[in-house]
Image: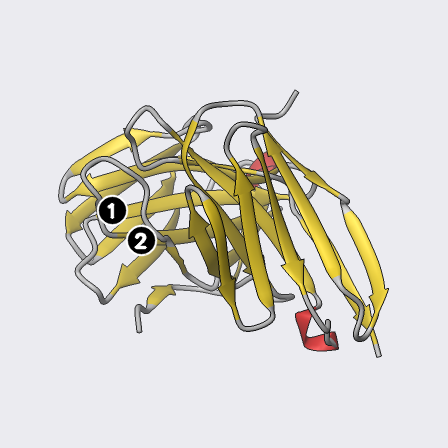
Amino acid sequence: DVKVTQSSRYLVKRTGEKVFLECVQDMDHENMFWYRQDPGLGLRLIYFSYDVKMKEKGDIPEGYSVSREKKERFSLILESASTNQTSMYLCASSLPRQGRTDTQYFGPGTRLTVL
Amino acid sequence: KNEVEQSPQNLTAQEGEFITINCSYSVGISALHWLQQHPGGGIVSLFMLSSGKKKHGRLIATINIQEKHSSLHITASHPRDSAVYICAVASNFGNEKLTFGTGTRLTIIP
């Protein structure tokens, strides 16, 4: 079974802090994704990586950056956390299918609160 | 208008009832996904389909590409089916990204 783990289930940070959210998958998947989920808005893609050191902006990249130095690990960075970044953050991974979609496997999520 | 619309937003039913959740989309797609999210956050992929119908246990997913519509059915519903069901589509522009609906919250009462 694919396992996607996230570094924290719950996180509380202060405005202006730098925040790191880590995601690790154990199935050698090329694709990794970071989403945020807010009530009434559904999941929205922040960033996507299709290979080590490769990244692509999603729909809402502002205020975020990412790092993928190893295939199994994809980090989301909030350079200076703000209250509007309070949300549930979900990581996912998938195999590539020649540029087409494949099943995405999700981590348990990190509920981030920025005070 | 959102690219992916689900209905209903909330659904409460008695145990044993037949459940239908609908998903309509406005773009050309290469595939449609149905996902399940239990309280606590974890999301599990139920189906990925690009045509016809798929069945897994008591769950059935159908898609009509011409009408840009998909349905998820649950037969003999059970309280453990209580969850949020999310529809997501992959565009036919050949990338890996999904666009998600806002979900249907299903509650099954014993």
Q: Give the x, y percent position of residue B8.
A: 77, 44
Foreground: A1 or A3? A1
Q: Which residue is mark 1?
A: A31
The percent coordinates of residue A37 (x first, y second) are: 56, 45
Q: Quadrant of residue B11?
A: bottom right
Residue positioned 56% across, 23% down in the render: B26
Name the amino acid, label 2. Ser
- Considering every residue shown, the one lying at the far bottom of the view is B110
Q: Chain of mark 1?
A: A
Secondary-structure class at tag 1: strand
Instruction: Say which amino acid is labelled 1.
Output: Asn
- Provide the chain ID for the residue under circle 2: A
Q: Which residue is mark 2?
A: A93
B64 or A107, nearer to the observer: B64
Q: Are marks 2 and 1 in contact (CB under 8 Å)?
A: yes
Please name the colour scheme applied to the rendered image. Answer: secondary structure
Residue at 76% x, 64% y is B18
Residue at screen point 47% across, 37% down: B89
Going from N to C along the chain, the mark reached first, 2 or 1, is 1
**Location of residue B61 with respect to A26 vertically, above or below:** above
Q: Position of residue B9 (x, y in %)?
A: 76, 45
Q: Residue at x 37, y 35 (%)?
A: B97
Q: Is residue A21 above or below residue B14?
A: above
Left or right of residue B56, residue A84 in this image = right
Task: Kindly tell me whether residue A80 is visible in this rendering.
Answer: no
> Is residue A77 shown above or below B109?
above
Secondary structure at badge 2 equals: strand
Q: Is residue A104 visible?
A: yes
**The one of A80 and A60 positioned closer to us in this rendering:** A60
